[in-house]
Amino acid sequence: MMLEPMPDILTNAGAPLIGYLLGAVPFALLIGRMLGIDLRTEGTGNVGAGNLTKLAGLTYGAAAAVLDGLKGLLPVLVARRLGLADGVAAAAGVAAVIGHNWSIYLRSRSGRGMATSVGVLVGLAPSLMVWTGLWAVIGWWIGGGLGGFVGWALLGPVAVMAGYPRPVVMTAFTLSLIVLLRRAQGQDGDSFEWREVAERVVWDTDRRPETLEDGRAERPVR
């Protein structure tokens, strides 16, 4: 007896749901726990690969970043493999980024979503990585926060000027909004005074204080 194919409405709705649940898996936090580190209370408090790199080193941070990128890539590839429309595949990828940033498993804000967003772009429009990669490199000289801001804020207009199809353009604008919104939100306890919000958006500044080794001075972490 052959099974009837699932109605389009179920597959179209199920792809983003699965993307969200996969994206919500906090790989950086899990790796940190294996190392005896709680990213929520140490470093910047950001549950992402960047904070893990600062606390545990580049090897572990890179591993978390790759896993986070796969969270964005796999939903897109699987949706396309199943023959779903590009818009559905894009929605599944975007849902993974939302899951990464606001994980149901943690019931709170999580990472910034940049690695997961990169995974979505690799699945949808790999050539856009030239733009984001360029600004990632430039960030080494002008500051990673500012480089990331310029790169992601202008991703949508770049997609338009490059003539990408509508699903890719809409995804580019949506990813920009999600990344910058998560920056603006900051960490638990961060002020929502507009100047500090603007600073977080542009510089990706975390306000959690970092105690220096002598125990007498503190400074905000960037």
Image: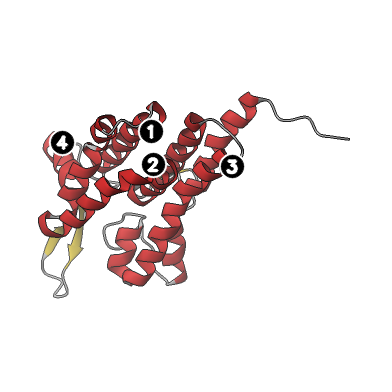
Q: Earlier in the sequence, mark 4 or mark 2?
A: 2
Q: Which mark is residue 168?
A: 1
- Residue 210 position (above or below residue 184): below
Instruction: Determine whether the residue tagged by mark 2 lies in a helix, strand or loop.
Output: loop
Q: Earlier in the sequence, mark 4 or mark 1?
A: 1
Q: What residue is pinned by disc 4?
A: 193
Q: Is residue 215 at least partly visible in the picture? A: yes
Q: CA distance from mark 4 to mark 1?
A: 34 Å
Instruction: Determine whether the residue tagged by mark 1 lies in a helix, strand or loop.
Output: helix
Q: CA distance from mark 4 to mark 2?
A: 37 Å
Residue at 29% across / 34% down in the picture?
Answer: 159
Q: Which mark is residue 81?
A: 3
Q: What residue is pinned by disc 2?
A: 125
Three-letter amino acid code at the position of disc 1: Val
**Mark 1 residue crowding within 10 angstroms, few (<14) / some (14–19) / many (20+):** many
Residue at 39% across / 63% down in the picture?
Answer: 38
Q: CA distance from mark 3 to mark 4?
A: 46 Å
CB atoms of marks 3 and 4 within 8 Å: no
Three-letter amino acid code at the position of disc 4: Glu
Q: CA distance from mark 3 to mark 1?
A: 17 Å
- Residue 164 position (above or below residue 61): above
Q: Position of residue 32 (x, y in %)?
A: 41, 66
